[in-house]
Image (cartoon, rainbow, N blue to C red):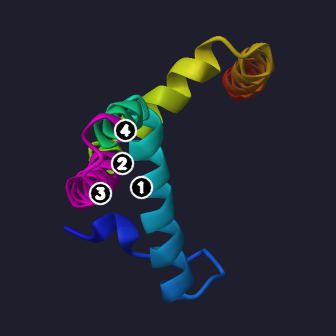
Amino acid sequence: MFEIFAKPKDIKASRIKWAFLMAKRSFETGYSLTNYIKYLIALFGLSSLNVSKTMTLALIYAMFCFLIGWLWYKYRFADVESEISNVFNPFIGEMREMKNNVENEKNSTKKKG
């Protein structure tokens, strides 16, 4: 369950820092994906004036944000999201083109030699 919180061996940070920052990242990702729900909770709080129920809803929402963010990383939606943004990034396109040109040159020199 917590494999995304496992620190890679090549990262120079303590396990506690890594786990804390991954939990923070999971919460923030879930929060950004579901941020309109906070307005519904605020509207409920303003209309009902029931602080107890509003705080309970906010706590449930916070746990839901963490869960959504954790699932976002667990099922690698973050990688796909990053790749989609790379498709439209001209710098990444140029770098991939340069990499392909270098690989083609290496392959052509191997065939000649």
Give the residue pinned by disc 3.
51
Residue, disc 2: 69
Left or right of 10, for residue 100:
right
Asked if the residue at tag 4 contacts the one at tag 2, i.e. Cβ–Cβ closer than 8 Å, the answer is no
Residue at 53% x, 69% y is 21
Q: How crowded is the residue under tag 3: few (<14 C-alpha within 10 Å), some, or many (20+)?
A: few
CA gap, disc 3 and disc 4:
9 Å
Task: Please report contact status of discs 3 and 4: CB closer than 8 Å, yes or no.
Answer: no
Q: What range is drawn magenta here? A: 46-70
Question: Which of the numbered marks, if any, corresponds to residue 46?
Answer: 4
- Residue at left 42%, top 55%? 27
Query: Mark 1 = which residue?
Result: 26
Q: Is residue 27 left or right of residue 102?
A: left
CA distance for labels 3 and 2: 27 Å
Depth check, front residue: 97 or 51: 51
Quadrant placement of the C terminus: top right
Q: Is residue 50 magenta?
A: yes
* Residue 41 highlighted magenta (yes or no): no
Quadrant position of residue 3: bottom left
Task: Find residue 73 and report its horizontal and vertical position in percent.
Answer: 36, 48
Q: Secondary structure at mark 2?
A: helix
Q: Are marks 1 and 2 in contact (CB under 8 Å)?
A: yes
